[in-house]
Amino acid sequence: MTHIRAELAKAIPEMMRSIDKIRNIGIVAHIHHGKTTLSDNLLAAAGMISNELAGKQLLLNFDEQEQARLLTINNADVTIVHEYEKENYLINLIDTPGHVDFGGDVTRAMRAVDGAVVVVCAVEGVMAQTETVLRQALREKVKPVLFINKVDRAIKELQLTSDALQKRFAAIISEVNELIRKMAPEEFVDDWSVDPRDGSVAFGSGYDNWAISVPYMQRTGVKFPDIIEYVNSGRTKEIAQKAKINDVIFDMVIRHLPSPHVAQKYRIPNIWKGDIGTPIGQAMLNTDTEGPTAFMVTDITMDPNAGEIATGRVFSGRLQKGMELQIIGTKLKNRIQHVSLFMGPERLMVEEVTAGNIGAVIGLTDAFAGTTTSTSPEMVAFEEIRHVSEPVVTVAIEPKRMADLPKLIETMRKVGKEDASLRVEINQETGEHLLSGMGELHLEITQFRIINDYKVEIEASKPIVVYRELVKHAGGPFEGKSPNKHNKFYFEVEALPAAVVQAVKDGEIPQGKSFKDTKTLIAKLVALGISRDEARGITAVEGTNILFDVTKGIQNLNETMDLVVDAFKEAVNRGPLANEKVYGLKVRLVDAKLHEDSIHRGPAQTIPAARSGIYGAMVLGDRMLLEPFQKVTVNVPQEVLAGATRELQRRRGEIQDMTSVGDLQTVIAKVPVAELFGFASDIRSATAGKVLWSTESMGFEPVPGELQPKVVAEIRQRRGLKPEPYDAAYYAG
């Protein structure tokens, strides 16, 4: 990368203060639809790379694994200056991954931006991950515009005429608008639909550096038949001169995507549940650079020279070297050592980053992705960033040399902090060090980083699927007795309605055991199918499981309830069937008999009794194992279709849909994650390499009855337990 031009470095700090001339945008798309290639062209506009290399250099894929695998793994940030109608605008751009394993990075990026350029391939059209990234953007109230990429491929490979090409575009636009109508906030459904006539849709080729939109056609006279003529005659350099991609895309961004000043007025109430009337609430609503600082960390990167770099959005106030920020939710304060802006692999040091911008900070060592920091210690934290999917594959890791064990533990903590989609479990008692991720690729790349970036030689187990536990029907009441036999708890369990589970996953029903607005929460539960009496007894939410206390007037229960909640948490985090987490369980405490003397109902008595009561009720409800499923979308030519479908069916895959465009066949199947190990190499062999495929999380479904005993026994043995799970008598004590 050429060094950032001196005049650019000089201009940016001044421009950060012109809030109406700032745009914070993310480039989002399905894998291999051309996000990073497009970003290259947009960097050429900033003079950061040569026009000849734009589209080929893939500058924002600066990680070694990204270059080797030709895919984006991490979010990459860059700040660009663009001239529009003789005025300079500052564009903070984040290039996001398209692979499902790195979807967490997309979710976190959407918290930092106000607008998204949704990239769709003209040949493949709207794909599974297109829908996912659009949902992630709209959930954060991020406004979309559309870029239909790889138009050159549609012209050459599908040999489309001007009319057929426009029909293809119309179908893609219609499909994107259908998704927006389905998922956009109600008040924005009409305003946020994309329309080629107003220029909120552009068409082009990221690889060949050109793009057009209807307003651009009207201004320059370049039309679709001209584009077809240029592409077919190999004169793409001529179009790139007449219809510069960066001008078309950035003009669209500036015209149609909001400034922070506009966006924060509707985004802040969506992502922050504090009192808007407070000084910090007003400062964020008005993007006030002079107000208290509110900075949300959306990404942590490890720089071998500088250490931890926290990147995120400044919603109010400013970030300055030497400033002390409170880590909200803790008593910790961190002092800022350096403030900068990311320029792809380089950083531009600045004196300050002001409200409405995306900044990078060194010194926030106690922060992680999702942390709120502020100069105002009493600030309410931003809403938790909710990821679309959760880790479904685990590997056990150990150092090759035992002397490296302390270094491995420290490294695993660091990678867990750097990648909020990873789950790291370090069990000092058993010596198990577990990494759970979104898929095989996610874990492969994490292991590569541990070995190469952190210099720890490791050995990893084969990937293991993450399962969940539930009950087939209602179970209980079941009596759980304390070891001293003086305390008894009676529990009933059943599966929660699917709508309630979804509301918990969406954050509409908060985690924990102290609820601020119980009246609204009770009304929400009743609307989702929980009876009013039961809803009034909501006591704790852990994962996707809810504990209800439906007892009446039991003496001393209030004093003991915190211990019952601890037992509930233990029970749902290690289920009775295979020690896997429990998913979507309703637990009802229906009765209790407690010793009058508090010394006889302490933690050592209460927790085992309540836990046994929950476990026993689950046994009576007929425990079952749930396994994760993924939607697999495969694109292949007609001649290798049979090989692709055979490969999917061999893996317990259920074919759900098949469509075709020209010679290209698209197969959509539902496949258990347990059967997808090694799929990448096998599908390539089955199709002679002529395949593009992607996956998307579909949640958990029951393991087939005939397979369950074998799978349960394998999991239990791996964990050092007896192969057979315990029966109800074991928990009766």
Image (cartoon, rainbow, N blue to C red):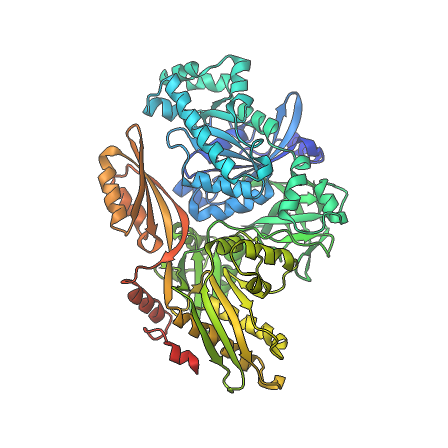
* Residue that sits furthest to the top in the current view: 221
In-image side of 665 versus 320 (left or right): left
Q: Which of 512 and 211 is in front in this view?
A: 512
Instruction: Work out whether 663 lies above or below 722.
Output: above
- Give the quadrant of residue 56: top left
Task: Tell me what residue is drawn at x 54 percent, y 61 percent.
Answer: 531
Task: Tell me what residue is drawn at x 47 percent, y 53 percent.
Answer: 453
- Horizontal and vertical percent position of residue 596: 61, 85
Instruction: Work out whether 269 lies above or below 485.
Output: above
Q: Which of 648 and 181 is in front in this view?
A: 181
Task: Tell me what residue is drawn at x 29 percent, y 66 percent.
Answer: 710
- Horizontal and vertical percent position of residue 170: 44, 25
Instruction: Work out whether 478 lies above or below 266.
Output: below
Task: Tell me what residue is drawn at x 25 percent, y 38 percent.
Answer: 641
Q: Is residue 285 visible?
A: yes
Q: Nearer the viewer, residue 367 or 202?
A: 202
Screen quadrant of the C terminus? bottom left
- Horizontal and vertical percent position of residue 435: 44, 59
